[in-house]
Image (cartoon, grey):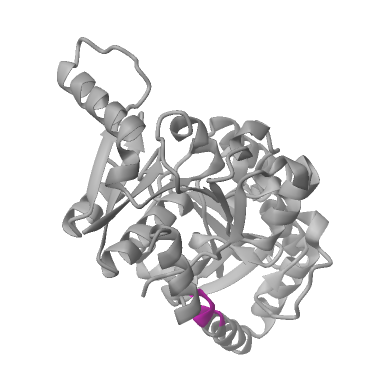
Amino acid sequence: MINLNVVSRISDDKNYFPDLLETLYLLKNNGITDVHILFIGTVYSPKVYQNILDTASRLNVSSNIAFTERSIPMNELNDEIKSGYFINFTIGEFTGYSGLESIKNGFKTIFYNIDKSLKNDHNDLITYCHTLDELTALIINISREQALINKEITACNHDMLNRFVLNSTKKQQLLSMMLPKH
Amino acid sequence: MRKILIVNGHLVIGGAEKLVYELAVFAQKNNIAPTVLIIDNYIREYYDPIFKQKKIKVVRTRLSTIRNFRAPLKMLRSMYWSLRLKYFANSVYDSVHVIGLHNIYRAKDFINHSNRFYWHVTNAAQGAYNYPESYFDNPNDTLVCINQYQENELDSHYGNDVFKCKRVLFPLFLND
């Protein structure tokens, strides 16, 4: 069983969910049927929510998805959810706070690029999936060599952490933005 | 103690709200008193108790002049904050930080300050740019991008000439 978690409110500006359903579909075609996605977030758009249900039904993956239908702070998730993989939507290689918090919490975090115009903006880190094919391939690899891939993902996530701590130059810059006359 | 004002529309679990939190905590750690102003939304949300515990002041009010005689206390409070931010913001706060370009309309005409920072927290893939060019016309204001892609998107959508305001890049950060 591979549990994927998506921490995002269900809303128009985050509507990249159908891509993930397509991944489930592609995985099923590859004989991998034990992948589940839990969508963790408040439903702000019933239309987007319904579209996820309809797409899942059309792709015959309805039994592979579930919703919390409310936002839950990451540190309050249960241990079973925490032990899964957290798929985080990114713009190229930019990740927002949900991705930062996810790696800070020590969750195995995978970044999926949703701006296809940036697909050539590439690095070769295992945790960054720039296309649907890369994401699908990664999950196939997880299903084959879970322990090894987990280790690589965890190491990669850990290396990212330092990027988000302010160094002294950045601290000074932020202070001068808060106290411009200083 | 020096003060800053951070403006947003919500305090729910979300990225923009997390930025409000990190800015407020950073300020507090550096002996700057942050006030978090939530405009047009009186619902108690996720970060309210967290800020309360950290002794970070949260003000929920409206700044536009909608009369609300059914809630006179709210109306008086709203008038107080409208006047305070329209005429005295410069003397009270060192800077004003508005989170999200979608919140500029709540602040630009209501908070007069010579150091306003507009934090841009979304990208083009999340929705087309439909903000008026006038948002960027004040040379005293600063537009803060949190990633390089936003800078490119803004330039290709508006053209560089539209930006009379200052522009800086400041990546997202965690305090600890």
Q: Quadrant of residue A90?
A: bottom right
Answer yes or no: is residue A114 visible. no
Q: Position of residue B135 (x, y in %)?
A: 59, 36
Q: Quadrant of residue A112?
A: bottom right
Write the residue at 67% across / 40% down: B127
Q: Position of residue B56 (x, y in %)?
A: 22, 54
If the image is split into quadrants, where does the C terminus of chain A sit?
bottom left
Q: Foreground: A146 or B115?
A: B115
Write the residue at 49% across / 73% down: A170
Answer yes or no: is residue A160 visible. yes
- Magenta span of residues: A160-164
If the image is split into quadrants, where does the N terminus of chain A sit?
bottom right
- Up-down: is A61 above or below A79? above
Write the residue at 73% across / 64% down: A27
Q: Position of residue A105 (x, y in %)?
A: 41, 73
Q: Position of residue A139 (x, y in %)?
A: 68, 72
In the image: residue B71, left or right of residue A52: left
Q: Foreground: A81 or B114?
A: B114
Q: Main secondary structure of the magenta part?
A: helix
Q: Foreground: B153 or B80?
A: B80
Q: Is residue A162 magenta?
A: yes
Q: Quadrant of residue A24?
A: bottom right
Q: Is residue B113 magenta?
A: no
Write the residue at 79% across / 68% down: A121
Q: Foreground: B156 or A55?
A: B156
In the image: residue B133, left or right of residue B66: right
